[in-house]
C-alpha cells in the first residue's frame, strides 16, 4: 500500500510515522508513505495556497490550481491512486470502509485546512470524502493519520498475529470482549474464573458472549451488519429479556381541552393497539389506570373476552397480546404492583406532546434500560398534569413533525412511535429470518 499525503504541514507527520508498528511497517517496506507539500505546487514567489472565498465570509479556501497540480503529479506516476479528501462532510470512517480501502494499491489523502478546498476540485477530482467523526479539527492531518493507521493494520505482515486483528472491535462487527491480566485480584476485583480455567472452548464462548453483550448495550446498531450465528441470536435474546419496560396508560389525573383535571374514558382502540404494541416489542406489561370501577369493569370484560372467551379461539395472536394488559384503580397501585413484580421501583418517564420541561433523549434513556425497570407514562385526553409530571424521574423528548410544529397524535400512535424509537435499534428478529433463509 502506498499512501500519498498532500498537506501544507509535512512536518506534522515526522514523529507519528517513525514510532510503533507503523514505523516498523514503513521500515520493512510493507507500506510506503510519500509526503507532498502543497506549497511546492504553487507558482508565485510567496507560495500561496489559499485565498478569500467568493461571496465573502470568514476564513480562507484552498486555491484549485495547487491542488490540481499536486493530484496530477501523483496520478501521472500512479494512475490507479484513489483520491480521498478528509473533511467533516465526508462519509463516516468505519472498519468496513477501512477494509474496502485496504484493497486499493495506493491512496491520495488530501488534508484540508481553513474553510476547505475549492468546490471545483471536489467535483472533478475527489473519489471519496471521509470524516473520522462528528467534530471539527484544525485540519485533515490528524484524520489522515487515523486512516493510515487503521488501514495499515489490515495489511498482511504489519500485525504479528492475524487473529489479533480478526478479534478486535469492529473487525468481526462486534465490540471486543473485556481483557484482564495479572494480578488475579485487584482492589477486591477478581478475574473471571473461566479465564483461569484453561478450557479454551469455554474461554472463547465467554468472550463471544461478552462481545455480544457489550455490542448490544453500547452499539446495538452494529448488530445489523455483524456476522451472527444461531447461537449468537439465542444469546442476544437472553440479554434482551433482561430489559424491563412497561407502559402506564393514565386516565386520571389528565387535562381536558380547557385545562381542567378530569378522568378520561377507557377506549377499546387504546387497549387493543397498546397490547399489540407491547407484545410486538416484548414489553413486560401495560398498566391501564382508571379510578372508576365501572370503566375498569368494562375493560375487564373486554380483556376476558379476548383472553378466556370466544375471542381467544377466533384470534389467538390478539389473545396473547391482551394478556399483557393490567388494570389498576390509581397510579400508586400500579407502581406498587410493578415494584413487587420487579423487586425494585421503576424509573418513571413522563411524556407529553409539548416540551413542558427539560427532557431526556432516546439515546440517554437507552442507557438506563440495562440498569432498572422503566415505566413510560402516557397521558390520555390532553395530557398528564403538571403535578403528576413532577413525580416522574425524567421527561421524554416530545415527538416532532418533519416540517412544522403540528403535534396532535393519538396516545396509541404516540406510544408506538416512542417505543419503536427506544427499542427499534435492538430488533434482531429480521436478522434471524435472514440467517434461516441462508
Image (cartoon, rainbow, N blue to C red):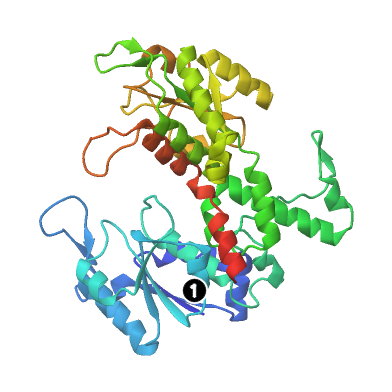
Left or right: 38 as drawn, with respect to 223? left
State the residue in front, 2 or 228: 228
* Label 1: which secondary element: helix
**Residue at x 11%, y 59% (from the top left corner):** 54
Q: Quadrant of the C terminus?
A: bottom right
State the residue in front, 185 or 203: 203
Residue 322: x %, y % from top left: 54, 35
Q: Is residue 15 visible?
A: no
Residue 45: name its quadrant.
bottom left
- Residue labelled with disc 1: 100
State how many labels appear: 1
Above or below residue 121? Residue 395 is above
State the residue in front, 70 or 90: 90
Above or below residue 391? Residue 234 is below
Residue 250: x %, y % from top left: 44, 21
Left or right: 422 as drawn, with respect to 285? left
Crowding near pointer 1: few (<14 within 10 Å), some, many (20+)? few
Residue 385: x %, y % from top left: 37, 15
**Residue at x 29%, y 16% (from the top left corner):** 256
Residue 305: x %, y % from top left: 54, 32
State the residue in front, 33 or 188: 188
Amino acid at each position: 500500500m502506498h499512501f500519498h499525503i498532500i498537506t501544507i504541514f509535512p512536518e506534522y507527520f515526522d514523529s507519528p510515522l517513525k514510532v510503533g508498528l507503523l514505523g516498523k511497517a514503513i521500515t520493512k517496506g510493507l507500506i510506503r508513505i510519500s509526503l507532498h507539500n502543497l506549497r511546492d505546487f504553487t507558482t508565485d514567489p510567496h507560495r500561496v495556497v489559499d485565498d478569500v472565498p467568493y461571496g465573502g465570509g470568514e476564513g480562507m479556501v484552498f486555491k484549485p490550481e495547487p491542488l490540481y497540480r499536486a493530484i496530477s503529479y501523483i496520478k501521472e506516476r500512479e494512475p490507479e491512486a484513489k483520491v480521498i479528501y478528509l473533511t467533516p462532510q465526508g462519509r463516516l470512517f468505519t472498519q468496513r470502509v477501512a477494509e474496502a480501502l485496504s484493497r486499493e494499491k495506493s491512496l491520495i489523502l488530501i488534508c484540508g485546512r481553513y474553510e476547505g478546498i475549492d468546490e471545483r476540485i471536489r467535483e472533478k477530482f475527489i473519489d471519496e470524502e471521509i470524516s473520522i467523526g462528528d467534530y471539527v479539527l484544525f485540519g485533515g492531518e490528524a484524520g489522515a493519520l487515523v486512516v493510515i493507521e487503521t488501514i495499515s493494520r489490515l495489511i498482511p505482515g504489519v500485525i504479528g498475529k492475524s487473529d489479533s486483528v480478526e478479534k478486535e472491535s469492529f473487525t468481526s462487527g462486534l465490540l471486543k470482549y473485556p481483557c484482564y491480566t495479572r494480578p488475579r485480584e485487584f482492589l477486591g476485583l477478581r478475574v473471571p474464573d473461566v479465564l483461569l480455567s484453561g478450557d479454551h472452548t469455554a474461554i472463547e464462548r465467554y468472550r463471544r458472549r461478552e462481545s455480544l453483550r457489550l455490542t448490544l448495550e453500547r452499539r446495538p446498531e452494529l448488530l445489523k451488519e455483524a456476522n451472527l450465528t444461531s447461537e449468537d441470536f439465542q444469546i442476544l435474546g437472553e440479554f434482551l429479556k433482561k430489559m424491563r419496560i412497561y407502559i402506564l396508560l393514565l386516565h386520571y389525573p389528565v387535562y381536558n381541552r380547557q385545562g381542567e383535571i378530569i378522568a378520561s374514558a377507557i377506549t377499546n382502540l387504546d387497549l387493543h393497539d397498546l397490547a399489540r404494541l407491547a407484545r410486538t416489542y416484548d414489553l413486560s406489561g401495560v398498566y391501564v389506570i382508571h379510578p372508576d370501577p365501572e370503566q375498569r369493569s368494562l375493560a375487564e370484560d373486554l380483556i376476558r373476552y379476548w383472553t378466556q372467551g370466544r375471542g381467544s379461539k377466533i384470534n389467538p395472536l390478539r389473545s396473547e397480546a391482551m394478556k399483557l394488559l393490567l388494570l389498576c384503580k390509581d397510579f400508586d397501585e400500579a407502581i406498587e404492583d410493578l415494584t413487587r413484580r420487579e423487586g425494585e421501583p421503576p424509573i418513571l418517564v413522563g411524556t407529553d406532546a409539548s416540551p413542558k420541561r427539560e427532557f431526556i433523549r432516546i439515546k440517554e434513556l437507552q442507557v438506563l434500560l440495562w440498569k432498572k425497570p422503566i415505566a413510560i407514562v402516557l397521558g390520555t385526553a390532553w395530557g398528564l398534569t403538571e403535578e403528576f409530571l413532577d413525580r416522574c424521574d425524567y421527561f421524554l423528548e416530545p415527538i416532532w413533525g418533519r416540517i412544522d410544529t403540528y403535534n396532535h397524535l393519538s396516545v396509541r400512535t404516540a406510544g408506538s412511535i416512542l417505543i419503536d424509537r427506544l427499542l427499534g435499534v435492538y430488533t434482531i428478529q429480521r436478522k434471524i429470518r435472514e440467517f434461516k433463509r441462508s
